[in-house]
Image: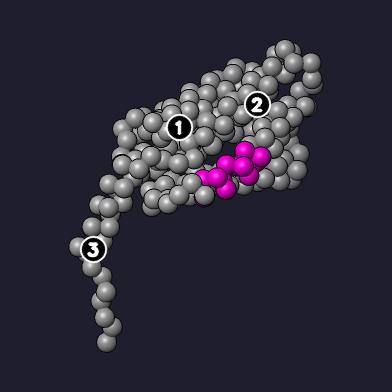
Amino acid sequence: MTENTEDPAADIAWMRRLAEEGAQAPMRGNSLLMFGGLLYGIASLFHWGIIVDLVPLGADQVWIGWVAATLAYWVILAITIPRLRRAGVSTTANRAAGIAWSGMGWGIFAMFVAMSVLGWRLADEAALNAIFALIPSIIMVFYGVGWAVHAEMQRSRSLWVLSLSSFAAAPVLALFADQAEQYLAYAAALFLLMALPGWLLMRQARA
């Protein structure tokens, strides 16, 4: 005979504590959001600058900005994450949001690896251009999911606005596919929907 150990009242109480904890405790790691938005926003501007001949490099060298941004962000992660772990007790809400953003980052990395493999496999320039033109839109969808979890943990309407705005940015960026303006618009989205909110949340947490 099996014993039913489910306790609905305890589950409800735990969920209530999680919601209250998330609403009261400042979210940690906001500096990572800010630096991510800044670095990749600058990389997008660099990409745009090459396409419109403002940067004296060939179109086959646009990868330089993205690789530089990624390496710089890895350095920031290596410095910041240990500091966050030493900063004190982490709430359940912080851990949940942290896992969501971390999963989002690994998801983006896996997407780039998959597209690189696809590029090697297909060797069809037209098809590859169409696929890679979707990358900014796909990344904004990832960000929308990250902000959605963040908003739920913080019980914040303003963060839900960021989530919905990130989702809305995805089809807007797709409208500029195969145009230099796509990377200009992508940079604006990164600055407004990642870097600026990260900076504002960081200031709020310090206050």
Q: Residue 55: image x %, image y %?
A: 74, 16
Residue 36 seen: yes
Which amino acid, mark 3?
A: Ala
Q: Quadrant of residue 69?
A: top right
- Earlier sequence position, callout 2 versus callout 3: 3
- Dot label at residue 83: none
Identity of the residue furthest to the left in this view: 9
Residue drawn at x 42%, y 37% as measured from the top left: 147
Left or right of 10? Residue 168 is right
Magenta span contains residue 160: no
Which amino acid, mark 2?
A: Ala
Q: Which residues are magenta?
A: 74-85
**Mark 2 highlights which residue?**
43
**Mark 1 highlights which residue?**
202
Q: Residues within 10 Å of mark 2 (few under 14, many from 20)?
A: many
Mark 2 secondary-structure assignment:
helix
Which amino acid, mark 1?
A: Met
Residue drawn at x 33%, y 45% as measured from the top left: 22
Q: Residue 179: image x %, image y %?
A: 62, 19
Q: Residue 89: image x %, image y %?
A: 42, 51
Mark 3 secondary-structure assignment:
helix
Comparing 175 with 193, the one in front is 193
Comparing 24 with 113, the one in front is 24
Q: CA distance from mark 1 to mark 3?
A: 34 Å
- Earlier sequence position, callout 1 versus callout 3: 3
Q: CA distance from mark 1 to mark 2?
A: 23 Å
The N terminus lies in which quarter of the figure?
A: bottom left
Comparing 3 with 133, the one in front is 3
**Mark 3 highlights which residue?**
10
The C terminus lies in which quarter of the figure?
A: top left
Image height check: is 136 above or below 104? above
